Amino acid sequence: MNKLFFILIFSISKLWASCPDYSVPLAIVEKHLVKSKTLGLKSKGLVLDASCSNALDYAQIRLLIATEGYNYTPIYFELVNAFSKEDAEFNSGNKFYKVAVSSKNPLLPLVALIEGSRINELNKVAKSALSLMVKIPMPKVESPKGITGKTSGPKQFDSKTKIGSSADSSYDYYLITDQNSTHSKIVFENSRIAHKARASRPYSLKGPLHPKDLEVFNNDLKELILYFEDDLNTELTKQVNIAAQDLISDTKDDDIQVLEFLEFKHNLLDATPGIDLVDGNTVELAYPAGESGIYLKVKFRVRAQTKYFRKTTNISVTIKNLKVSNLIHVSPQEDGSVEVTIPNEVKVKGSVDIDFSNDILNLIISAIEKTFDPLSKKLREVVADTLKEDLKEDLEKLVNASKNPFGKEMEVLAPYSAPVENKEQIIQKIEDKMFRHHLADSTLQNPVLRNEDKLTWKDYQQLDLDSLEYDRATIGMDGAIWTGTFLTSMALKYSVTQSGQDLERIQLLLDKINVLATVNGAGPLSRSAIPESSRWYEQLEREGRLQTFRSKLIEGEYWHSFQGYQGVSRDQYMGVMTGLINTFMYVHDPHTRDKAKRIFKHLLDYLIHTNWIVFEDHPGNLFDESEPRTLPAHYAGIGLHKLTYLLAGKIMFPEDETYQAQYIKYLPLAKMVWFLDFISSLEPLDEYYNYNLKHTLYLTLSNILEDEQLQGHFSKGIKIFEHYIGHHKNPYFSAIRYVTAQSFGIDLDFYSMKEEIHENYNGAFYRAHNMGMATEDEKELAKIYSDKLTIAYTLSGEKRYKVPAAIPPRFRNYSLDFLWQRDPFTPLNINSRIKRGNIAGLDMHIMYWLLRAKDIR
């Protein structure tokens, strides 16, 4: 006879009131059950928990009966308040209790018939355990107030309060109370029914996640998949044909020989991976997301022959409603951390149908399928086991990263940086240099000086701008983002100075950004552009670096656009779009605002027209090795970008119905912003520039978002970044979180943040203005960090040499563009210079005027 084993789970409602200490009776119950020879329980299979009900003293014991190869629905033993001595089976003080058995498992009568004495014994043990639990005094509680509900019996009840879920997630259980009497009981509902009820509740921006939030998020991802529809269909057909030909070749001498591949059907482009709602704000990775399932059908012509017969028939193998879920659960916490858990089992649904055109064979296989369903079960087991094994390492890395942010546990005492005086004069000299030497054409660039020196920012007042001569130019493939960021910096400055010169410089930057926005006609934003009259045009053409995407006549001369080898990216758009928004918000000169609005509308209209996928500069096939197509700049599921741009569009153009409709369409993405912020926060060793994108958008959003509900949703992202990268000693990001937290009403340690911001920004003035030209004294001081270099691994498994502690900006490795978007774990390179180039100083400039404009003293 199959050996039975039992798992005991004691569960009652969520803790609403102050509970007695259950540790002693729990230990006694556990000891009693483990010693029971009849049950054969082992201590490691026993789980006990307890809390208090705010409506009724009740409890539930779940006994899961399982035999080898089969799992049965649990038997539930419910503790019910009997309210009278006559109905009670035991009592505690003045309260009377009875125990009821509840199970909807149709196999239970069969189990009881075979193991009748065992069921009776279980009943006795359940009563014993429950009676022991109620010996502890319970706090005084009141009757619940909830929504109206009914039980399945003739008695109607007025109140229905959810108190939990069964451990196997098959049922939710509710406390049902009749307000006109003293009768109460616990009933169970199928979780699927309860899920549908939750899904049908009216949508609201308030409260926890709603299925609509996930639907909008997942549909956005599907739009991106459909962009590659032709590429994917071509590749799928190719791979299936290869597999079919291999099968034909491999079976040519077998009893069942595959003769021909006839058909391949699927819905893989409709059934896309994404996020499903578990409960509250907890989500899980699922494939496919939502209610859909994967459909695959392959049809062959086969010949079956034995000693007695030979038949040729068509055979179709169809996988239907395949869905994988329960891979990993992700839930944001109030303190900014995110709880990531890996469930014990991967859930796989789906079935396999086999159809033969030969009637006799079809009848036989159908009977086998209906009786045993062997292929469907095997499919689910194989998929679950394979995923669990293949993804185990990656998921464990994710969990570890969520619990242990890199560099948070280690601190290296930094050398002292004396306060730098006259910061504003230094910043003004940096600004003058940028306008004079770094804006030769359309974008902010970093040309190479003919004679390099080791001058630091703190000594910049000594710099003679007339003495600077350049050896050659750089194209500035990231020119758009930094020119737009420079525009934001000047707008922040203008909000403080209201200077006429600053206004003129803002208008000059707008003219350059207008070239980037329009040089490709009605096409995408250009990364950079150069006119044929430029002093660098002939040199770039001679060196073969003039890789023109499009050309356009602008104000009497031809301009050439550059998109780079990967096309324009989201960060280029982000720099320009936020620069235009901040100009509109901080600069109240009508002419300047109108110019910013006009450029912004041109860019936003293009994004909407292309369905938020910038595809024009991404030719080729995704799977063509000779001409591969990279992923285009897209905004699939990325609510922070979309909603910031659309909200700004609504503010600038309140009568524009398109912006209003788009904003409403994507509004549910606000409740999922935290998820993408969390995912990006886990990888500080690669693509650190993502943090710059998100923080710059939050800075802009804090200036235009007034809706408190939306502020609450976006606040989760700020808390997540404060928790996971707040130790990075990045004064720019910290200042942005400081500003946004105050705007959105987030409670952070503002005093400590201000001290850290000013300390690390002050240290950055000790850096050299030429790439890699640190003094020998600086290199010597930086050894305390380079000596601690160790091997670290990215989430993708790539090896890096990093310091496992945040390095102050003064001693970080040099960056030609923007210091704040480079990771804080790479120390100053004390052995060699990486490359030549004069650093513009935009990172120093925007940091200063952000502190001044937002009064962070």
Image: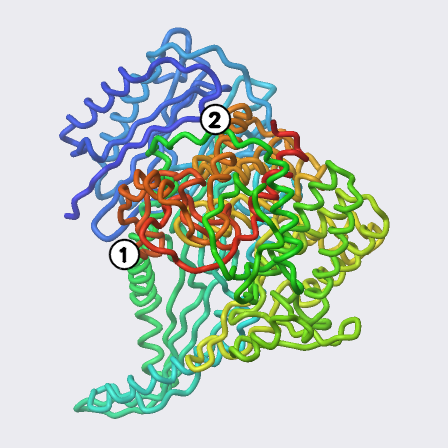
Mark 2 or 1, which is nearer the eye? Answer: 1
Name the image quarter holding the C terminus.
Answer: top right
Q: Which mark is residue 566?
A: none
Residue at 25% from the left image edge and 92% from the top image edge:
310
Could you say which is closer to the camera, residue 281 or residue 53?
Answer: 281
Q: Quadrant of residue 353?
A: bottom left
Q: Quadrant of residue 57?
A: top left
As drawn, is 181 to the left or to the right of 170?
Answer: right
Circle 1 — which element?
helix
Q: Which comes sooner in the sequence, label 2 or label 1?
A: 2
Are there few (<14), some (14-19), or many (20+) residues within 10 Å of tag 2?
some
Residue type indicated by callout 2: Lys
Residue 374 on image: x %, y %? 29, 65
Circle 2 — which element?
strand
Could you say which is closer to the camera, residue 186 or residue 615?
Answer: 615
In the image, is residue 707 above or below residue 14? below
Residue on which disc 1 sits? 389
In the image, is residue 54 above or below residue 590? above
As drawn, is 318 to the left or to the right of 636?
Answer: left
Could you say which is closer to the camera, residue 494 or residue 171?
Answer: 494
Q: CA distance from mark 2 to mark 1?
A: 43 Å
Residue at 71% from the left image edge and 56% from the top image edge:
509
Residue 82 on image: x %, y %? 43, 18
Residue type indicated by callout 1: Glu
As drawn, is 6 to the left or to the right of 225?
Answer: left
How many marks overall?
A: 2
In the image, is residue 345 above or below residue 763? below
Residue 532 on image: x %, y %? 67, 76
Q: Which mark is residue 185?
A: 2
The reply to whether residue 635 is in sight is: no
